[in-house]
Image (tube, grey):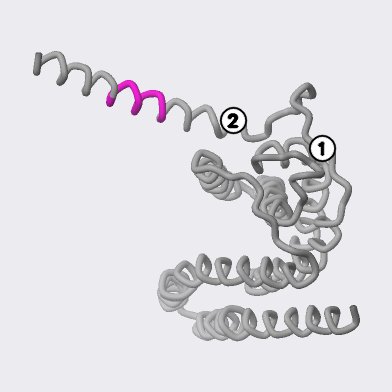
Amino acid sequence: MLLSGSKYIYSTLESSMLILSIYTLPFYVLDYISNLSNNNFAYYLSTFIKNFMFVIPIIPILYLIVGQKIVKQLSTIKDKTTNGSHVYQNLLLSFSYLVISLLTNFNIYFNFIFSSISYSIYLSEITYNFISFEKYKYNNLIDFYNYNKKIFIISGLLFGIMSINIPIHFIPLLYFIFTILICPFLINYDYTPYNNLILHFNLFKIFELPINFIIFMTHTYMHNNITIKNIKKH
């Protein structure tokens, strides 16, 4: 147990140093350089180069690395399971993250609310990898989140509150450390088992509507197109 705890702490420190070296420190240096000149044109140009040559390309790579490290590290304290998933679920989650990311750009209040919701969904994704199917009977992440969204939204709001006054170049580090600290509690939390007789508010319903419409229109077009071609052949 002591060895496992020491390994967990060591992995946390190692990953934290990685985030600092590939994102936080370079971001800080580039930000410092951008603010050296009092010339507005030089500032906007250097900021543009910083964002489009460094921040935008590195962010998805960084969070991909962080996500893999989090799951791998949590696997040292609890075995990873193979709970149900499907293509539609992955499509719905990706679309949800995309819409939520756009909503965060309206103002500071939207940013806080929707960033917290986005993070709560992410926490449920990680936790879903470690819950017992035999115990909880969930066969998809959507039901798991909807049945237990209170604990995840509270966790997301806690992260949102902590990140309010944190400089932007420290956000990925906070994201990693907070996730690593809270997930051991979440994966051992006693969740509500799935029961198809009990209905829960579906947070993803608003995201499902446009996806279902696109799928319906695509299905209709392909079905009619194939049917017409077969009629012409005969």
Please give the residue where the numbered disc 2 appears in the rendered image.
206
Residue type pointed to by label 1: Pro
Query: Closest to the observer: 164 or 215?
Result: 215
Position in image of residue 62 (x %, y %): 55, 71
User: Of the residues shown, which amino acid type is indicated by label 2?
Assistant: Ile
Quadrant in the picture for residue 217: top left
Determine the residue positioned at 70% across, 46% down.
Answer: 117
**Residue 10 position (above or below residue 99):** below
Lower position in the chain sequence, tag 2 or tag 1: 1
Examine the structure image and report whether residue 216 is included in the region drawn in magenta: yes
Residue 28 falls inside the magenta stretch: no
Task: Specify the quadrant of the image occupied by residue 227.
Answer: top left
**Mark 1 — residue?**
193
Residue 106 in the image: above or below residue 188: above
Local packing at callout 1 (Cα closer than 10 Å; few below 14, some 14-19, many 20+) is some
Q: Give the range drawn in magenta.
A: 215-222
Q: Residue furthest left?
A: 233
Left of 38 or right of it: where is 45?
left
